[in-house]
């Protein structure tokens, strides 16, 4: 069993796939890419690795049914959104021929690609960031920005966990999480597969704007958290949280401040001072640290 691949996930893979992965260096494995007619591939921190296994349509169908535990109905709503969440918090993206039901996307058939994203908890990942996020005993409105795969979700998850359970200098907070893509808490069977703390309420598989609205109205959070914001509805939801006196912690895709401030729906929040801290995390060795930090006026602090 590869030491860096969770045993529960390995058990959900076909024996043919598990066998070739077992003979591979999987340190830091991030994704398993399975495309019909192409070799299976692993995405690692240092790049891509091709496996000696050509992925066939038969393998794809068998693997999908194994992941679904032979029950398409149980995962019907997730399939409509192009992903399923597994026990352990791992997420499988899937695409193929789309089909529609009364004008709305009903799901995919003839699945041609699977992307198994390995979920990881890095306990303590948030530690280097607290001096930039907490001031005067409160959490500043903070945006974490970085390209895909840079560790934003892992970092955001650990921040939520610590803020919910309490850490030095700040009392535990009631946190509301809008987990549209089911990556932060990865709720499966009503239970979060990844630790978001003991005072956290999660809405999964619901668009962020609607989820934030429900959290504000129903759960009385002191802090609202969401991942990968970008739409006009997302930004309005965060403004609604501010108007309700609730803190905000979010993430977005961007490689640098100029790229972030150029995004159509985010630029208003970025340049208006809505976010008191904008942080670009970077990898250092096996951990994350603040690569660049800006205040609400766009002044670079580090």
Image (tube, rainbow, N blue to C red):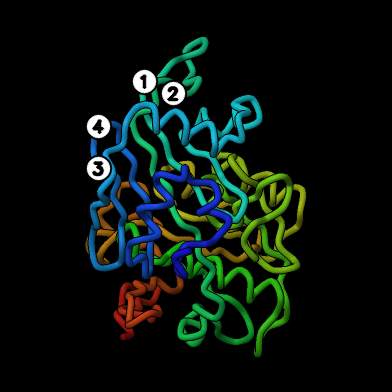
Please rate how many residues cluster around mark 4, counting C-alpha atoms within 10 Å: few if below 14, some from 14 to 19, many from 20: few
Q: CA distance from mark 1 to mark 4?
A: 16 Å
The residue to which callout 1 is attached is: 97
Residue drawn where x is 63% and y is 71% of the image: 161
Q: Is residue 274 visible?
A: no
Q: Is residue 65 above or below residue 31?
A: above
The residue to which callout 2 is attached is: 108
Looking at the figure, which quarter contains the C terminus? bottom left
Dot placed on the residue nearer the N-terminal end, 2 or 3 = 3
Residue drawn where x is 47% and y is 36% of the image: 63
Which type of secondary structure does the marked residue at label 2 adopt?
A: strand
Checking the image for residue 37, the label placed there is 4
Please rate how many residues cluster around mark 1, counting C-alpha atoms within 10 Å: few if below 14, some from 14 to 19, many from 20: few
Please rate how many residues cluster around mark 2, counting C-alpha atoms within 10 Å: few if below 14, some from 14 to 19, many from 20: some
Which type of secondary structure does the marked residue at label 3 adopt?
A: strand
Q: CA distance from mark 4 to mark 2?
A: 18 Å
**Residue 173 in the figure: left or right of residue 299:** right
Q: Nearer the viewer, mark 3 or mark 1?
A: 3
Q: CA distance from mark 3 to mark 4?
A: 7 Å
Dot placed on the residue nearer the N-terminal end, 4 or 2 = 4
Q: Nearer the viewer, mark 2 or mark 3?
A: 3
Residue 157: x and y in percent read: 55, 66
The residue to which callout 3 is attached is: 39
Determine whether label 2 and label 3 are within 8 Å by CB: no
Residue drawn where x is 64% and y is 57% of the image: 193
Front-most of residues 293 and 185:
185
Which type of secondary structure does the marked residue at label 4 adopt?
A: loop
């Amino acid at each position: 069993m590869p030491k860096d691949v969770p045993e529960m996930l390995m058990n959900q893979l076909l024996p043919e796939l598990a066998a070739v992965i077992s003979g591979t260096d999987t340190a830091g494995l991030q994704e398993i890419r399975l495309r019909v007619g192409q070799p299976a591939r692993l995405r690692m921190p240092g790049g891509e690795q091709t496996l000696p296994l050509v992925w066939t349509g038969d393998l794809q169908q068998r693997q999908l049914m194994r992941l679904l535990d032979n029950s398409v109905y149980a995962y019907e709503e997730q399939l409509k959104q192009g992903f399923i969440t597994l026990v352990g918090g791992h997420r499988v993206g899937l695409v193929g021929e789309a089909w529609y039901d009364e004008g709305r996307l009903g799901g995919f058939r003839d699945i041609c690609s699977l992307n198994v994203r390995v979920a990881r908890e890095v306990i303590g990942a948030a530690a280097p960031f607290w001096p930039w996020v907490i001031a005067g005993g409160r959490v500043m409105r903070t945006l974490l920005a970085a390209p895909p795969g840079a560790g934003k979700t892992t970092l955001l998850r650990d921040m939520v966990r610590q803020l919910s359970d309490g850490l030095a200098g700040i009392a535990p907070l009631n946190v509301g999480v809008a987990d549209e893509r089911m990556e932060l808490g990865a709720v499966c069977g009503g239970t979060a597969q990844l630790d978001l703390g003991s005072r956290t309420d999660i809405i999964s598989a619901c668009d962020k704007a609607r989820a934030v609205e429900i959290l504000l109205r129903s759960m009385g959070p002191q802090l609202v958290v969401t991942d990968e914001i970008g739409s006009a509805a997302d930004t309005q939801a965060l403004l609604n949280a501010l108007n309700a006196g609730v803190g905000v912690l979010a993430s977005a895709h961007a490689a640098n401040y100029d790229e972030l401030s150029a995004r159509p729906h985010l630029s208003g929040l970025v340049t208006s001072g809505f976010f008191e801290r904008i942080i670009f995390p970077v990898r250092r060795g096996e951990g994350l640290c603040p690569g660049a930090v800006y205040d609400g006026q766009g002044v670079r602090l580090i």
